[in-house]
Image (tube, rainbow, N blue to C red):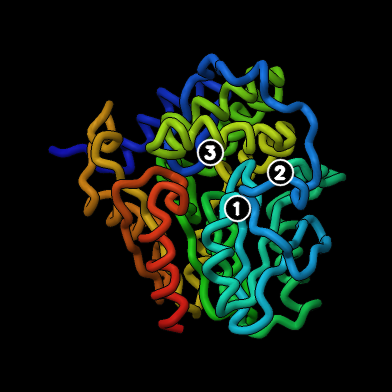
């Protein structure tokens, strides 16, 4: 009998993630690889608006809302809120922003603690505060039915928001982000929480050099296909506060927002990356159709959910396949 795909995800997660500190968001995690760039990586963390050509130029406005740093682009059309993933920043969306700003108001947010921003103070749930901050952004700026687009952990936030606040948005897009961590979806809550706590402890206790090495190894093996892109963008992730990264990761890995997502009344799109060589390695072998079906299953009973696969691509679909990604997103926005 063929092993169910979720069990293969679980096996991959257990054998690769739990013993290491380099946790991956919705992929697998990998051991800390030696980072040849670590010695030359910048130690200063300038403000996101000063980080150079990888960021969309000249935002219309920049401000803070709750635990979000927000940059605004474009001046007309349906609002689109872009939420990066674990340790990410607005740099993830540069090409997307450059395209969307032509016909949309774009609100590119950075979660507190990521990309050189200060980590949230206090012990309250980071996920709860991010969710409340997104609602505050929409309400305080009087955004009319925006679409939330999130990558990885940001995609999880987008799906959760769609389930809890469908009245505030027109739709949600998750780019390799899901309402429950793949491989942990069949586990009881207590077991997920124990795994999440172990991951957070290992990542949070890593040295600065090990954290940089983890980010490079992650980008090389999970993040993107092109090694040059991996080497270029890994230092961007390494600018994030490692304690904040560990905390967000633990909340994501321990959570299960399928019950909330089932209440979503707006269209939801899940974008699934697929890369054949990766899918045929190790214990986890799956066709593109099988992976898409597995993701569809994790969306549960969300009434208006659809799944689209983009290949060849790894976790950062917008970097590996920018043309396909922008077309897929445009098609969804035009359908609303």
Nearer-the-camera pick, 169 or 165: 169
Q: Earlier in the sequence, mark 2 or mark 3?
A: 2
User: What separation in Å lies between label 2 and label 3 (alpha carbons)?
Assistant: 24 Å
Q: Which residue is mark 3?
A: 192
Looking at the image, residue 174 lies above or below residue 51: below
- Determine the secondary structure under disc 2: loop
Q: Which mark is residue 117?
A: none
Q: Which residue is mark 2?
A: 114
Question: Do we see residue 290 in this rendering?
Answer: yes
Looking at the image, residue 335 lies above or below residue 48: below
Question: Do we see residue 125 in this rendering?
Answer: no
Q: Residue at x 33, y 43 (%)?
A: 6
Residue 22 lies left or right of residue 277; in this view the side is right
| Residue 253 percent coordinates (x, y) | 55, 42
Nearer-the-camera pick, 244 or 181: 244
The answer to whether mark 1 and mark 2 are in CB contact below 8 A is yes
Residue 34 lies left or right of residue 47; in this view the side is left
User: What separation in Å lies between label 1 and label 3 (alpha carbons)?
Assistant: 23 Å
User: What separation in Å lies between label 1 and label 2 (alpha carbons)?
Assistant: 9 Å
Q: Residue at x 55, y 59 (%)?
A: 150
| Residue 10 percent coordinates (x, y) | 38, 35
| Residue 276 percent coordinates (x, y) | 24, 40
Q: Residue at x 52, y 30 (%)?
A: 231
Q: Which residue is mark 1?
A: 84
């Amino acid at each position: 009998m063929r092993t169910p795909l979720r069990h293969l995800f679980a096996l991959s997660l257990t054998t690769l993630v739990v013993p290491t500190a380099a946790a991956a968001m919705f992929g697998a995690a990998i051991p800390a690889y030696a980072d040849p760039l670590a010695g030359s990586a910048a130690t200063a963390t300038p403000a996101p608006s000063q980080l150079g050509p990888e960021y969309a130029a000249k935002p219309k406005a920049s401000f803070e809302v709750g635990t979000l740093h927000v940059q605004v682009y474009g001046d007309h059309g349906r609002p689109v809120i872009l939420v990066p993933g674990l340790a990410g920043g607005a740099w993830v969306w540069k090409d997307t922003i450059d395209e969307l700003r032509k016909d949309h108001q774009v609100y590119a947010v950075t979660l507190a603690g990521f990309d050189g921003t200060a980590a949230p103070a206090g012990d309250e749930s980071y996920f709860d505060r991010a969710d409340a901050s997104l609602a505050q952004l929409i309400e305080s700026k009087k955004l009319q039915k925006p679409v939330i687009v999130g990558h990885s952990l940001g995609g999880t936030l987008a799906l959760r928001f769609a389930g809890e606040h469908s009245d505030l948005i027109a739709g949600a897009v998750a780019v390799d982000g899901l309402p429950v961590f793949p491989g942990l979806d069949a586990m009881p809550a207590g077991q997920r929480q124990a795994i999440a706590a172990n991951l957070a402890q290992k990542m949070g206790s890593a040295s600065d050099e090990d954290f940089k090495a983890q980010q490079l190894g992650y980008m090389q093996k999970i993040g993107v296909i092109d090694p040059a892109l991996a080497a270029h963008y890994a230092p961007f992730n390494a600018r994030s506060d490692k304690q904040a990264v560990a905390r967000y990761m633990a909340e994501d890995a321990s959570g299960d927002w399928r019950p909330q997502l089932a209440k979503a009344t707006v269209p939801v799109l899940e974008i699934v990356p697929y890369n054949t060589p990766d899918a045929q390695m190790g214990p986890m072998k799956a066709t593109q159709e099988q992976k898409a079906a597995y993701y569809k299953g994790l969306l549960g009973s969300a009434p208006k959910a659809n799944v689209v696969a983009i290949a060849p691509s790894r976790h950062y679909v917008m970097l590996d396949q920018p043309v396909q990604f922008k077309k897929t997103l445009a098609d969804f926005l035009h359908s609303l």
